[in-house]
Amino acid sequence: MGSIRNTFGGVALCLVVAELAAQSGPTVAPGTSSRSATVEQVLKPGAAQTAEELNLAAMIAEVNGLEQQGNLPAARNVVEKLVACLKRSQPSGDLLPAATDRLASLEQQQGNYREAEHLFESAVQLWEARPNSPGIGLATELNNLASLYSEIGQLERAVTVRRRSLALRIQLLGNTDPKVALSHSNLASDLLRRGQYDEAEEHAQLAAKIWDRCDKEKNQADLAYNTLARIQLLEGDTRSAISSAQLAIQTFNDDHGKSPVQLAGYKYTLALAEEKNGDVQAAVKSFQDSLDLLDSKKTELMMRVGVLRDYSQLLARMGQTHQALSIQSRAKKEAIQLMKSSAYQYTVEADALRAH
C-alpha cells in the first residue's frame, strides 16, 4: 500500500503489516462490528411476523448459510435483493441500514472496495436519518467504515471517522463499555500506523484497562497489548515489547473462537521483538508459527509477504542460506500477487486522485 510505505520504513513497516490482522471481520478484528446481529435482532426468531417479515427472515437465513459455506458471491446477490426489497417496504426502518452494511461487508471481503466504500457511506447516511440519531447503530457503522479505510491504507480518513465513532460510543455507553475499548484500540492502531506514537499508546492503554475489567467473553485486550508491543518495539524497549506480545498471545489463547490470522499477527510482532532483543532461536520459532497460521488460511497477502521477507532476512543472517533463498523466493511471488490485488490497486488509485 503506497500510503503506508511512504510513512514507515524498517521495523515500523513490519509492524504495519502485522497490524492488518487486528481489524474487524476477515479483514478487520473479530467483534468489531455487529453486521448480521442488527438484522437478526429486528427479526427475532419466534416473534409474531407478517408474511413479508417471514420472507425477509428466510432471505437472511439463506445469506447466513451461504456465508458459512464460503459462497460470498451468492450471499452478496441475496443481500442485494434484500436491500432492494427493504427500500420498497421499510425505507425508514433499522433493517435497511443493517442490510446495506451487510452488503458492504460482503463487497469488502471480495475485494470490491469501491462498492464497499459507497455502501458503507450510504449506511452511515441511513443511520444519520433515523429519528433517534445519533444512536449506537451509527457509531458501529462509522467504525465499520473506518475499518475499510484502514484496510486500504487511507489512514487520515480512518482516524477522522474513528474519532467520531469513539466520541459517540462514549456519549451513549459511558467510558467503561467494551465497545468503547474497541474504539480506543482501533484508533490506537491507526494512529500508530500514522506515526503518532504517544497518542496511540494512550488509547491502547485505555483500551487494555477497560477490557481487563470486563467479563472473559468480552475481553479483547489482546488487541491493545499487541499495539503496545509494537509501540515499545519502535521505541527500542524490546523486553517490554516481548512481554506485551506474549500477553497478547496469552489473552488471545483464552478465547479459541478468534481468528488464527489474528494470532499470526501477534506471533509476528513477537518474532520481531525477539529478533531485535537477540533471541534468535525464539524469533525463528515465532516466525515459523506465524507463517504456519497464515498458510492455514491462504489469505492476508500483505502480512504473509512481510513475514516471509523478515523471516528470510533473519535466516540469511544466521547463515542458513538455502532456506533463506527458498523463503525469499516465496516472498517475491506473493509480493507480485499483492501488487495485483484489489486493495493495492484501489489504494494507489485513491492516492493518485487525492494528489490532484
Image (cartoon, rainbow, N blue to C red):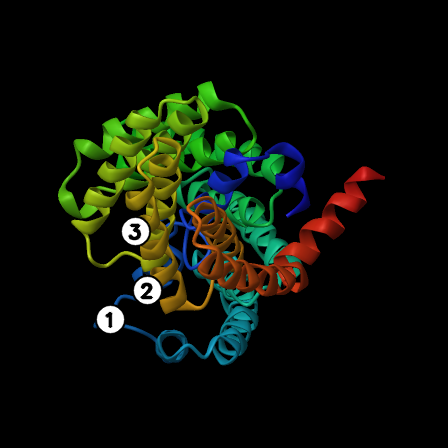
> How many other residues sit within 10 Å of disc 2, few (<14), some (14-19) or many (≥20)?
some
Q: Earlier in the sequence, mark 1 or mark 3?
A: 1
Badge 1 element: loop
Q: Which residue is mark 3?
A: 285
Residue on which the image places disc 2: 40
Front-lying residue, 77 or 246: 246
| Mark closest to the chain's N terminus, 2 or 3 | 2
Residue at (14% x, 44% y) in the render? 216
Three-letter amino acid code at the position of disc 2: Glu
Query: Disc 1 marks which amino acid?
Result: Pro
Farthest right residue? 356
Indicate whether 329 appears above or below 132. below
The label nearer to you, 1 versus 3, is 3
Residue in the image at 29% along x and 26% along y: 239
Q: Which residue is mark 1?
A: 45
Kind of residue sitting beneath label 3: Lys
Q: Position of residue 324 (x, y in %)?
A: 48, 56
